[in-house]
Image (spheres, rainbow, N blue to C red):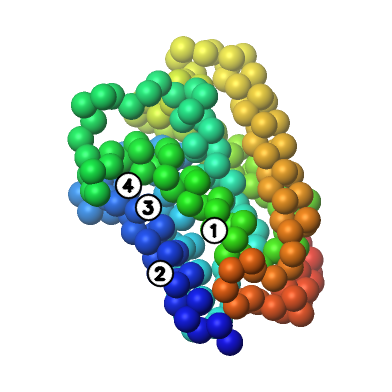
Amino acid sequence: MHTAVNVVVALVRFAIATLALVGTKDIWMRGDLDGLAYFTNQAGLMLAVVMIWAGVASVLGRRQPPAWLKGGVTLFLAITGLISFFVLAPEAADAPAVAFGLTSGTIEHEITPVAAFLDFLLLDAHRRLRLRHAAYWLGYLLAYCVFATVRGLVWDLGYPYGFVDLDELGWGGLGLNVLVYGVGFYVLGLALVGIDRVLPARALVGYPVPDPVRAHDEARQVDAVA
């Protein structure tokens, strides 16, 4: 077994988890629960959990996080990066650095999305995702939109993003945004599944956990659950 390589893989994953935790520290360290309303922070916390899980599994040679979960978190981080780049206003020039000379915006909107995708490409076993997983991930986006709407409409706590701001958009505008973002989200999910299907089954870096036989068994188990 490639023990030394697996240790390096684990350290990389722990480093990614550390960045994700630094980017979301206002929530888990300072109790800023309002921060959980942001899709970016939800994705960052999920990334931290999944990377710690994957890092421990890499060291111990145990089963990696389920493909649908790992792929979903990768997609959520990719969406975070794309929306930040194309939709959201740039971070303020005087935003304070939170660690390593980096701002939370730089960490959450630029570094962790790229790191999550590279981890998926290089360190994960592949050919485990199914087309239906893209629909599962879309379900999370729709649930988030419902949550953001109810939070602002019923509890009057405001809307985390302008593209889900019911007060500004009205029901028609909100529905159109959900449709447009939903289609884009689903297409990106399908693209991620497609990438997974064309890559070699074994992880490109590190010992394959699970190996192709275990990957096949896991896929059958997921099929049975679905």
The answer to which of 81 and 162 lies nearer the viewer is: 81
Q: Which sits earlier in the primary sequence, circle 1 or circle 4?
A: 4
The disc at residue 7 is none
- Residue bearing mark 3: 20
For the point 60% across and 78% down, the residue is: 207
> Is residue 9 shown to the viewer in this render?
yes
**Real-space CA distance between mark 3 and mark 4, rounded to the nearest whole angstrom:** 5 Å
Mark 3 and mark 4 in contact? Answer it, CB < 8 Å.
yes
Asked if residue 55 is positioned above or below residue 192 in the image, the reply reads below
Is label 2 in a helix, a strand or a loop?
Answer: helix
Residue at the far bottom in the pictured view = 1
Is label 1 in a helix, a strand or a loop?
Answer: helix
Give the residue type at disc 2: Leu
Asked if residue 224 is positioned above or below residue 144 in the image, the reply reads below
Which-is-in-front pick, marks 1 and 3? 1
**Real-space CA distance between mark 1 and mark 4, rounded to the nearest whole angstrom:** 18 Å
- Residue bearing mark 2: 11
Mark 2: few/some/many CA within 10 Å (<14, 14-19, 20+): some
Give the residue type at disc 4: Gly
- Residue bearing mark 4: 23
Q: Which sits earlier in the primary sequence, circle 1 or circle 3?
A: 3
Mark 3: few/some/many CA within 10 Å (<14, 14-19, 20+): many
Give the residue type at disc 1: Asp
